[in-house]
Image: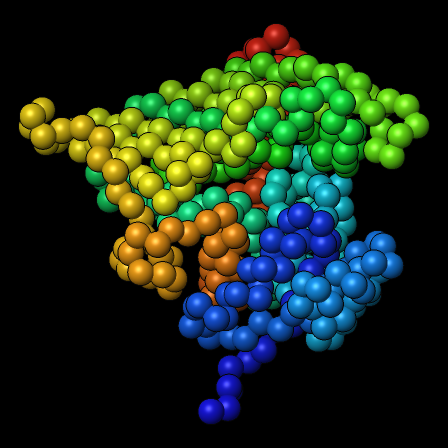
Amino acid sequence: MTDIRPTLGVGLVGYAFMGRVHSQAWRSVGAFFDLPVRASMTVLAGRSPSVADAAAGLGWTHAVTDWRDLVARDDVHIVDICAPGDAHAEIALAALAAGKHVLCEKPLANTVAEAEEMAAAAEKAAARGVLSMVGFNYRRVPAVALARDLVAAGRLGAIRHVRAQYLQDWIVDPEHPLVWRLDRERAGSGALGDIGAHIIDMAQFVTGEAVTGVSALTETFVRERPLPGGGGRGPVTVDDAAVFLARMTGGALATFEATRFASGRKNALRLEVNGSLGSLSFDFESLNDLWFHDHTLPPEEAGFRRVIATEAGHPYAGAWWPPGHGLGYEHTFTHEIRDFLEAVATRTPPAPSFTDGLQVQRVLAAVEASAAADSHWTPIP
């Protein structure tokens, strides 16, 4: 049977870790989800001549060494940005101006000013039918999406407490090289922007509330590291860890911790929400599980119970394997791209939007400002 669905050409910028992850998602999304459009993996952009080999290995038809050539192509309708943070604004602004839909990895930008410019451009582009989205992929974990559904349905009642952590240990060794994520000019910030942005977005997504103010501490534990490839050492110009207290719009108290120095923790993204009628708890290191407590039950029956979020009725899970056959990290990106393609095809504003990304950026900036001012309480504009 002839496939009469319209085809959207995709251009991906960047083919390191995140580019490989996105490539996997673009390859798999059409095989597992019934979509109103087809996605064609048209062109991959990267600065190195090895981009041609990467394109062949990852499934892209063409390769270019300048992202501007990608944006200029008539057969590219979607630009997927997986470059480091210092390139997000320039690429996204150019793509939106050229009429391309944009999916941009998080955090949206390296500064609030860049994020404001991007959000304003996205709003103008949306009036022309050109859509944009930020890639906060953890929203698309079925258990996390289920948590959001439970809160939205009122199962937790009034939200009282939010606890969010993102714990990693990949730079505990002081001899780990000075990679780009440890350079403020490239990354914007350290653990705060890299992984703290995720828990800020997740807490706001699940609760439906926004962070309104923070009191923060940040620390850089290892201040110099070996330069990649040898040749001496260089300064670490970002935070290694950030902790902060926060208030949510509904009045809830919140605590956040983001660190890359939690020895033994590989990717422990955790969220607990306590409400007047119940609680829920999630840990990405057991990503198919959501723990839910219904406080309206008699005490003899109450307590946290494990929900394995792999049933056909759970968000996204029905497209994959039989119940109990777990999903993984890579599936969250397939879900993200599925949602983005659905939004583009139906001209529906996707979420999280660039405006949502800007709000997270403002929280990140407030955390840095508070930490620089001896943890002074700092409202979010």
Q: Residue at x 50, y 70 (%)?
A: 30
Query: 42 or 212, which is in the foreground?
Result: 42
The C terminus appears in which quarter of the rendering? top right
Kindly tell me whether residue 9 is visible in this rendering. yes
- Residue 292 place in picture, x, y as percent: 25, 35
Farthest residue in the right direction? Answer: 231
Q: Residue at x 54, y 32 (%)?
A: 266
Farthest residue in the top direction? Answer: 374
Q: Which residue is drawn at 60% across and 56% down?
A: 22
Kindly tell me whether residue 119 is visible in this rendering. no
- Residue 42 place in picture, x, y as percent: 69, 71
Give the vertical position of 322 relative to 83 (above or below): below
Query: 93 or 279, which is in the foreground?
Result: 279
- Residue 1 place in picture, x, y as percent: 47, 91
- Name the side, left or right, on which 271 lies relative to 70: left
Query: 193 or 224, which is in the foreground?
Result: 224
Query: 332 or 69, which is in the foreground?
Result: 332
Give the vertical position of 57 relative to 328 (above or below): below
State the image quarter where residue 274 is shown. top left
